[in-house]
Image: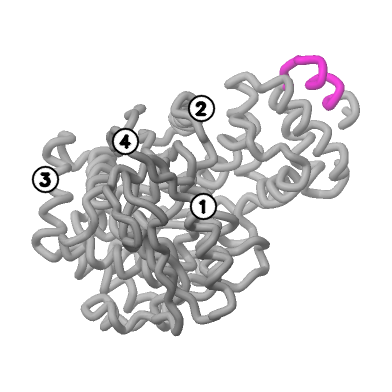
Amino acid sequence: MRAYDLIDKKKNGKSLNKEEIDFLINGFVSGEVADYQMAAWAMAVCFQGMSMEEIGNLTVSMAKSGEIIDLSAIEGCKVDKHSTGGVGDKTTLVIGPIVASQGVKVAKMSGRGLGHTGGTLDKLEAIPGVRTTLSDREFIEIVNTVGICVAGQTKNLVPADQKLYALRDVTATVDNIPLIASSIMSKKLASGSDAILLDVKTGSGAFMKTREDAKELAEIMVEIGRKAGKKMAALVTDMDVPLGLTIGNALEVREAIDTLMGRGPEDFTDVCLELAANMLFLAEKGSTDQCMRLAKEAVSSGKALDTFARMVKAQGGDEAVVREPSLLPGACYTMKVKAPKAGYVEHMDTQGCGLAAVLLGAGRDKKEDQVQADAGIVLRRKTGDRVEKGETLAVLHTSCEERLQAAHDRLLACYRIGPVCPPVGPHILEYIS
């Protein structure tokens, strides 16, 4: 078997069988299949697509390329959640504690931010002392005692995807649905949970710009997981507007804590409750209505906030921050972004909002970049809001004063203000199971 023949086969629109896909993936990881050959195959996939069987075989092959995490030492049902990424998406910090407070284990492997999307690990590490690099023993012990742990992925988890994604990133093959689905689901299958809820974002701040593409991606991933023996469901959620009112690590942690206290922004609270209720439903905690009541009760009773505080302490963080968010890092410099004219916010370039936060130091252009925990944006007006000339649209936060003007100009360009109040759609667009 030769990589050349498999590239040629896919180039001509034919499907590869399991043995052929295993040959490509195993050879790529070992170095026997060269980067340029894998890049050619990925481009052929972009033009010719993949069958559902091929996508499933690719996902399993990548999942088996490294460590498969054994969570059998964790008692009870383990439920995971994955978001395809967005701006202001700090849902894990809220829904994880909600679900865990109701007796469902959440063993969460998360990532870091890159480009316009934020990363859960960066947000969590804004809390002084929190550790996200944990041994397997520590991880399992925290999940068993607290009910939830959020940690970084090990280097041995799906090395095939790590190599392939880096290659796709520089060969214009990132935005392909079969390759996206296999990338996400290979990590989810290797992470060992019993049930997986997918939050597939769509809109100007998401990788999937259209609702149709988001739905297709969600359906493919649900089918992959189902065939692998996992309980699966997916929500397609709106990311045409930043989620909540904050963008940036410490700012988002503060908003997550506010939400666990029952005083978070309406859009963010609604999405968190829907996600948490669906995770509880996958764990067979009752009907969807019963699970929604459980999620709301976890917040109103303070159980979810207590669970978050216990998780922070277990991971080495200062749990006092959970009770007093003013202890979080604060920026030295702020700048207001003001409306140039009166009218309604007709649209926001949400991806541009995320990139403005990166300019302030809240995110990364490259994986090796360092982030500022205190940098970010507090939004005062979003799509559908009325504004007057000179009114504050947003407030920028950073510890590097020289970053402010470029971020100001970038964020201001993200707002389209006009005479018509736009319709504001639902936050949850599709449910797939």
Residue 234, image x and y in percent? 38, 34
Identify the element where label 3 is drawn. Answer: helix
In the rendered image, is residue 195 in sight?
no
Residue 106, image x and y in percent? 34, 55
Residue plotted at (86% across, 41% down):
33
Query: Front-most of 167 and 64?
Result: 167
Cα separation between marks 4 and 3: 37 Å
Position of 254 relative to 6 (above/below):
below
Q: Are marks 1 and 3 in contact (CB under 8 Å)?
A: no
Cα separation between marks 4 and 1: 18 Å
Which region shows up in magenta? Answer: 6-16
Q: Which mark is residue 413?
A: 1
Residue plotted at (22% across, 39% down):
284
Cα separation between marks 3 and 2: 32 Å
Mark 1: which amino acid? Ala
Q: Earlier in the sequence, mark 4 or mark 1?
A: 1
Q: Which mark is residue 293?
A: 3
Mark 3: which amino acid? Arg
Answer left or right for 323 relative to 219: left
Cα separation between marks 1 and 3: 41 Å
Cα separation between marks 2 and 4: 28 Å
Q: Which quadrant holds the N terminus?
A: top right
Residue 261, image x and y in percent? 17, 65
The residue identified by callout 2 is 213
Cα separation between marks 1 and 2: 27 Å
Position of 231 relative to 387 (above/below):
above
Q: Earlier in the sequence, mark 1 or mark 3?
A: 3
Residue 41, image x and y in percent? 80, 31
The residue identified by callout 4 is 420
